[in-house]
Image: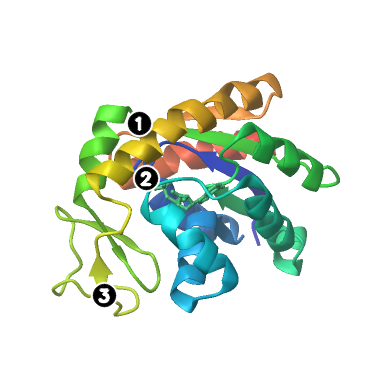
Amino acid sequence: MTRGVRMVMLGRQGAGKGTQCVRLSRHYVVPHISTGDMLRAAVREGTDLGLKAAELMAAGELVPDDVMIGIVEERLDSDDTTQRGYILDGFPRTVDQADALAKITSSRPLDAVIDLDVAKETVLERLAGRRVCGDCAANYSVDKPPRYGWVCDNCGGDVVQREDDTPAAIEQRLADYESKTAPLIAWYDERGLLEVVDGYGATDEVTERLLTAIDQRRS
Ligand code: ADP
């Protein structure tokens, strides 16, 4: 079996992180850990975390660092991630989260951090047309809908517009990305971990570029 990988995927909302992370996680046989998906599951299940996070998420605001760090630390402590690795999507999003991640992973450091690069003007268009499965989080768009109605091809769930894909919440999330998350690109570059990958082109092409960049880092 192919060797696993420990990596972080950075990139603007709508850059294609979710779609590509699912493909990469199948290729390297490691879990795709999306903090956004974990929080949405908590909201659906009505857990304490979900109750705390729901309002912030709907407004496109970040959940506090200490909450997020706790969730990720616990997830990275499980057998599947310690044995084969993981693809982190949506974390870290602030320098404090990146600092905490460096501590959490000190005994098993990251292989790579990818910046999936797509310009702001492009992601604005993509987010407006984005639709997702409410059950398995598969991504679709008004241009690429599921085969039958708005029923998920993978799991039969309802495909809907995300609650935070409204113009106001999109604006808030992109502003937070520029001010809080984009600085991590330089932060990881200084630490010799960063690979910038062009996020334009067909989904398969982007996957190929990602595999090439990641494999270089693993060898
Ligand atoms: P997007 O990247 O499109 O905003 P995500 O699915 O990654 O979407 O995250 C959705 C929401 O979940 C964020 O807007 C934020 O409220 C919360 N969230 C997810 N990850 C984090 C994180 N690492 N730190 C703080 N908030 C987070």
The residue to which callout 3 is attached is 158
Determine whether the residue tagged by mark 3 lies in a helix, strand or loop. loop
CA gap, disc 2 and disc 3: 21 Å
Residue at horizontal 59%, vertical 50%? 88
At numbered mark 2, what does the secondary structure look like: helix, strand or loop? loop
Alpha carbons under labels 1 and 2: distance apart:
9 Å
Is 20 located above or below residue 158 in the figure? above
Name the spot of residue 179 as percent of width and height, x first. Answer: 48, 26
Kindly tell me whether residue 198 is visible in this rendering. Answer: no
Picture coordinates of residue 66, whole percent (x, y): 68, 49
Q: How many marks?
A: 3
Q: Amino acid at mark 1?
A: Val
Q: Nearer the viewer, residue 135 or 206?
A: 135
Instruction: Residue type at mark 2: give it.
Output: Gly
First along the sequence among labels 1 and 2: 2
Q: In this figure, which residue is indicated by the disc labeled 1?
A: 118
Task: Give above or below for 122 relative to 38.
Answer: above
Q: Which residue is mark 2?
A: 16
Tell me which amino acid carries mark 3.
Asp
**Residue 71 place in picture, x, y as percent:** 66, 59
Q: Residue 11 sits in which quadrant? A: top left
- 41 sits left or right of 106 in the view: left
Task: Decide if residue 200 is on the left or right side of residue 178.
Answer: left
Q: Is residue 194 left or right of residue 54?
A: right
